[in-house]
Image: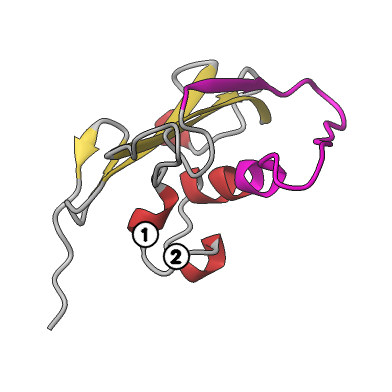
C-alpha cells in the first residue's frame, strides 16, 4: 500500500483545511522552525491510532485541536484523513473491496470521544 494524501483541518497549527499529496518514492518536508513540520508527522501518527497525548506533545487529547491565536479563534473540532492506494489489494481482507482506503479520525473539544470512519465511539470511562 502507498500513502497518497494527508488532509488536515483544525489539527494543531493547521486551522484551515490543507491537503498534502504524497507522491511515490521519498517525500520530504522542509521549512523554517515553527512552520508545522512536526505537526504533519503527528497528524499522521494520530490518524493511524496514536492514543497518547504525551506522544503528540500534549497534556490531553484536546490539545491536538487548534487552540486559537491573536487573529484566529479556537476550533472545536480537529480532523485528519489519510488516503491509501490499495490497488495491489495488500490491505487486510475486510478492506480489499476497493482500490482506495481512507482512514479518518476526528475529535470534538470537550466531548471526550473520537469519531473514526464516520461512526462515534463510546465514551471512555475512568474509575
Answer with the quarter of the image where residue 79 lies: top left
Q: x and y percent of residue 78 in the render? A: 37, 38
Task: Left or right? Give the position of 127 relative to 90.
Answer: left
Determine whether label 1 and label 2 are within 8 Å by CB.
Answer: yes
Task: Left or right? Give the position of 27 relative to 12.
Answer: right
Q: Which residue is mark 1?
A: 61
Kindly give the residue lying farthest to the bottom in the view shown.
Answer: 127
Residue 66 drawn above or below residue 4: below
Number of other residues with Cα within 10 Å of mark 1, as a class: few under 14, some 14 to 19, many 20 or more: many
| Labels 1 and 2: the sequence-earlier one | 2
Looking at the rendering, the stretch of residues picked out in magenta corresponds to 16-41
Q: Residue at x 14, y 58 (%)?
A: 123
Task: Left or right? Give the position of 101 relative to 2.
Answer: left
Q: x and y percent of residue 124 in the render? A: 18, 65
How does the figure colour the protein chain or chains? secondary structure
Q: How far apart are the alpha carbons under marks 1 and 2?
A: 5 Å
Q: x and y percent of residue 94 in the render? A: 40, 34
Amino acid at each position: 500500500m502507498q500513502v497518497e494524501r494527508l488532509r488536515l483541518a483544525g489539527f494543531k497549527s493547521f486551522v484551515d483545511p490543507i491537503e498534502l499529496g504524497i507522491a511515490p518514492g521519498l517525500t520530504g518536508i522542509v521549512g523554517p522552525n515553527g512552520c508545522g513540520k512536526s505537526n504533519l508527522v503527528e497528524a499522521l501518527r494520530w490518524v493511524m491510532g496514536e492514543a497518547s497525548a504525551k506522544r503528540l506533545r500534549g497534556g490531553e487529547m484536546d490539545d491536538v485541536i487548534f487552540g486559537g491565536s491573536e487573529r484566529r479563534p479556537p476550533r472545536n473540532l480537529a480532523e485528519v484523513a489519510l488516503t491509501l492506494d490499495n490497488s495491489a489489494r495488500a490491505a487486510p481482507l475486510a478492506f480489499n473491496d476497493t482500490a482506495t482506503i481512507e482512514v479518518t479520525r476526528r475529535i470534538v473539544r470537550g466531548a471526550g470521544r473520537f469519531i473514526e470512519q464516520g461512526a462515534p465511539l463510546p465514551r471512555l470511562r475512568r474509575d
